[in-house]
Every structure is written in structure tokens, then in C-alpha cells.
Amino acid sequence: MRYVDTASLTIPAGWRQRAERAAAKVKDEIEAGQEPTFPSLWSEHPLRDPLIAIIGQKCWYCETNVHGSNPDVDHYRPKKGPATAGTHSGYWWLAYKPDNYRIACKYCNSGGGEFEDGTRPAAKVALFPLLNESDRATTPSADLKLEKPVLLDPTDKNDHFLIDFSADGWPQRRSTAPLSALERAAGICRVEGSIEICRLDRDLLNEGRAGKMEEVTKAVKAIDAIAGTVPTASDHLEQMVRNWIDQRNLYSGAALSALRAHRYLPLIEKTFATELAADSPEAALAERTLAIIDVIYLMGVGVISPGALLTGNGPTGEVTAELLPDGRIRYGARPYASLDSAAKAATGAADTDGWIFWSTSYKGSLQQLSTLRNDQLSGNRLSTGSQQDAVDISVCKLSNTRDAATTAALEQIMALRQDCPG
Ligand SMILES: [Zn+2]
């Protein structure tokens, strides 16, 4: 996902007038207690074409190609009742507001992607959960700013920074963006929620991103290896990388993740300083003061090992999972992005806390992961220095390697990264 700046969007005057008439009709129907009917003016070319033109033929949610596939104009806030909000009548008053429109592929908007377990809801459609359900807007006069949606919004300057991709193309939360206070209170990670809502971990997406990330990785390693000794080749490779991370190109968010994962190489940090600086949001800098203790951290300090067996008590007995080297959890046939999501899959209960659910062997006895984490916290491991360790361990997570070269590079970047978390 990339930031889509809609400020430059120009709506033809004729369309606006017709939209106002349609909105008035819908309002009359609502006030008369009737089921509203929505003339689909949003799918007309005079409106859709300038929306598509902003970042090109891409889905704003998953960055897949929509060229020739008649993309949808999605209502970010659904015009009909959000499926997760009981009797809510939908945001009918936003049906003809262009700032509620997002270009979306059919998979993200209407479903069609399939998982082997077949248990997920059918794409976004009318799903629009909030972190704070009690503040949901139910009338045109309500303040939408009070709502805190789960679904990441491509037109929100801060949202796209939250999502990141593992080296094999899986979407995950950016390791330097801890959960917000509201997410913690609601027990919901917005990134995981968005992955669920739009099925952002579809096989085709993962494969497409992984391919793009591999290209970026090869290019940046080549740039580093030749170190300017062949200027024309360096220029060419740099241009290729800049092209891949351009927001108008497919899976550019994943390409940017691959570039970020190699900023531990001093030459890459220097060469792409502008691009990497633009990729470090002020919000993330502020949040960096928060504690980052995750399974990657626990692996980094040697409390648990990659490949560790995790066990939990499921509804029908003990279940097991494996901790993968990149911090994901393999449970059953597939890896999950977090302890929570794997635990939820194991229990079928949405309120399962993965840190409490999963245990592992530590110094000869079975320990809840929450206990191991709390031991780290109570041992004052979260001094400033340890936070820096956690950030740097996250670099290992992104580059998916702990070989000697990376370990040596980490020592160098301790200084480089003081003011620029990846
Ligand atoms: Zn999509």
C-alpha cells in the first residue's frame, strides 16, 4: 500500500450536479423509511478515470494491476450497512462523496480470492470494523474524525507506513511501528485486520511481491558489490531501483520494503538517502520511544530459538506450532503473522491473546511466552540501549538473515540508524 494523495483530483462539474441529485434522492428514501437505491455514478468514466490516473492502473489496497480489468470504485466507508456493526444503516450520505472513493481490484473489494481453509469473510464488501465501535457515525451530522477504522486507508498519510513485507512477500506489521494505544485497548492490530478484510496475503500477491523484492535485493547487492567502480552500471541499477519503488509501479510498497531491508549497507543508505528519509514518518519516530518486545526480540536475545516448538491448549486438546526464523508462526498448513493470529486460528476465538496461549520450553520447563516477555520487561531490558537492539534485530527480520556479514553490518548501522528507524 502506498499513500494516494487525492488533493489533485478534479471532478467534472456535470458529474457533481448529478451526484447531488442522486444524494438528495437517497436522502428522501431514507427519510421515508424506504430501502435506498443508489445510481452507480461512481463507476462512470468522468469520475473513475481521474481517480485511476492518480497512481496509475493499480488497486489502492493491494497494488495489483487493474489494467483491463474494469476496476471498482470502492466506498471506503460502505454505503450500505457495515457487516460488523449490527443494525447500522451504512454511510448512505457518503455514497456520492469522492473523498470516500478508493480504486480497488475485484479481489479486494468483492472477493474471489480463496484460501485453503476457506474460513475468511468474502473480501471487503461492507466490512468496516472500528477500533472504537461506540464512536461509529450513524448520521450525516456525526464527526467521522472520531471513528478509528481498522482498515488501513491509502489516502491517509500515516496508514501506509504501518504495513511491511517479509522477504517472501507476506504482508506484516512494520516492526518499528508498535501497536497504538487504541489498538492495544481493542486487541486489534490494524495491519492484521486489513490483511483479513482485503485478503492482502493472497498467494498471487505474495508471489508478485516476492518476485519484485528479489529483483530489488539483487540490484542493491550489485550496487554495493561494485561500489561505484563501474559508474554506468551503478547508475543503471540505481535507476532500476528508483523505478521499482515509484508508487506508480506494481508492488512498489514491497519493493520499498526490500530496499529498506538493505539500508544496513552504508552505500545503500547513502545512495537512497532521499527515498529512505521519505519512508521514515514523523509518527513512527515519535512512537519509537515505545517498547518493542516481540518474538523477534526474544529470539535476538536468545530467550527462544528459531524453529522452537510452541504448544497451546486448544478447544479439543493440545495444539502445536513452530516459530519461524522471520518471526511468523507456522500453525497447520500456513504461517501466521503473529502469535495472536496463530492462536486465534487454533482456538477459533477472536479474543485469544497469543502471548498467553502459546508456551515453549525454557531452561527445562514449559513457560508461557507472556512470562518470558515480562521477564525481559522486568529485567529493565527496555532501556534506551535495548530499544536500539530491538530496532536492529528488526533489521535482521527484514533481511531474513543472521549471517556473519549481517552481524558485522549491524555493528556499523548502530551509528547510522540513531535517527532513522527502518
Ligand atoms: Zn486489490
Image: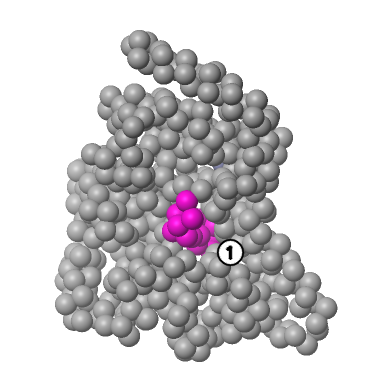
Secondary structure state at the residue bearing disc 1: helix
Residue at 73% x, 66% y is: 240
Image coords of residue 119 (percent x, y): 38, 36
Above or below, 140 relative to 186: above
What range of the chain is rendered magenta?
156-170
Residue at 17% x, 68% y is: 371
Residue 102 quadrant: top right
Image coords of residue 223 (percent x, y): 70, 78
Image coords of residue 144 (percent x, y): 36, 40
User: Label 1 amino acid?
Assistant: Leu
Q: In this rendering, would 183 be left or right of 236?
A: left
Above or below, 226 relative to 135: below
**222 or 267, nearer to the observer:** 267
Judged from this view, the residue extending furthest toward the right is 232
**223 or 345, nearer to the observer:** 223
Mark 1 lies on residue: 256
